[in-house]
């Protein structure tokens, strides 16, 4: 547990001596927070991933002519075109 959690537990134990304590509820909340933290994912953007320059690639080729190769459409796209007409 972090220092903040220990501090909160200590405060609730002091309050419990006066009859105002919430120790079981606090422990449930802290356990739920730990579980949520373990099951949550942190998304980190990798530098350069899926980033393309704004200029076309043909500008960088020495001859200036780009060769475009036509590939067949993916199967899911062909099936969708067939269904939609």
Image (spheres, helix red, strand yellow):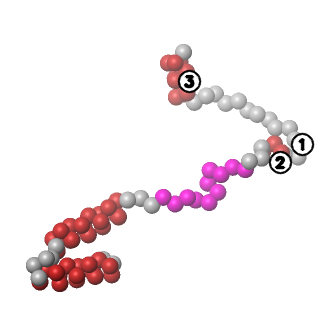
Main SS category, magenta section: loop
The answer to whether residue 46 is magenta is: yes
Query: Quarter of the image holding residue 65?
Result: top right
Q: CA distance from mark 1 to mark 3?
A: 35 Å
Helix, strand or loop status at disc 1:
loop
- Residue range in magenta is 43-53
Instruction: Tell me what residue is drawn at x 56 percent, y 24 percent.
Output: 78
Q: Residue 82, relative to residue 61: is it above or below?
A: above
> Which quadrant would the N terminus be assigned to in this image?
bottom left
Instruction: Tell me what residue is drawn at x 17 percent, y 74 percent.
Output: 23
Q: Picture coordinates of residue 12 (x, y %)?
A: 20, 79
Q: Picture coordinates of residue 34 (x, y %)?
A: 30, 67
Instruction: Tell me what residue is drawn at x 74 percent, y 48 percent.
Output: 54
Q: Residue under circle 1?
A: 63
User: Which badge, 2 or 3, is on the more N-terminal residue?
Assistant: 2
Query: Quarter of the image holding residue 70?
Result: top right
Instruction: Tell me what residue is drawn at x 18 percent, y 68 percent.
Output: 25
For mark 3, does the 10 Å Cα neighbourhood hold few (<14), some (14 to 19), or many (20 or more) residues?
few
Q: CA distance from mark 1 to mark 2?
A: 9 Å
Q: Residue under circle 3?
A: 78
Q: CA distance from mark 2 to mark 3?
A: 33 Å
For mark 1, does the 10 Å Cα neighbourhood hold few (<14), some (14 to 19), or many (20 or more) residues?
few
Q: Nearer the viewer, residue 70 or 30?
A: 30
**Is residue 13 left or right of 57 when viewed as pictured?**
left
The answer to whether residue 52 is magenta is: yes
Q: Residue under circle 2?
A: 60
């Amino acid at each position: 547990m972090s220092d903040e959690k220990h501090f909160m537990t200590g405060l609730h134990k002091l309050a419990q001596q006066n009859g105002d304590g919430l120790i079981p509820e606090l422990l449930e909340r802290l356990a739920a927070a730990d579980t949520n933290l373990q099951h949550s994912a942190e998304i980190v953007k990798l530098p350069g991933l899926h980033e393309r320059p704004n200029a076309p690639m043909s500008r960088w080729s020495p001859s200036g002519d780009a060769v475009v190769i036509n590939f067949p459409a993916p199967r899911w796209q062909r099936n969708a075109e067939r269904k939609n007409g």
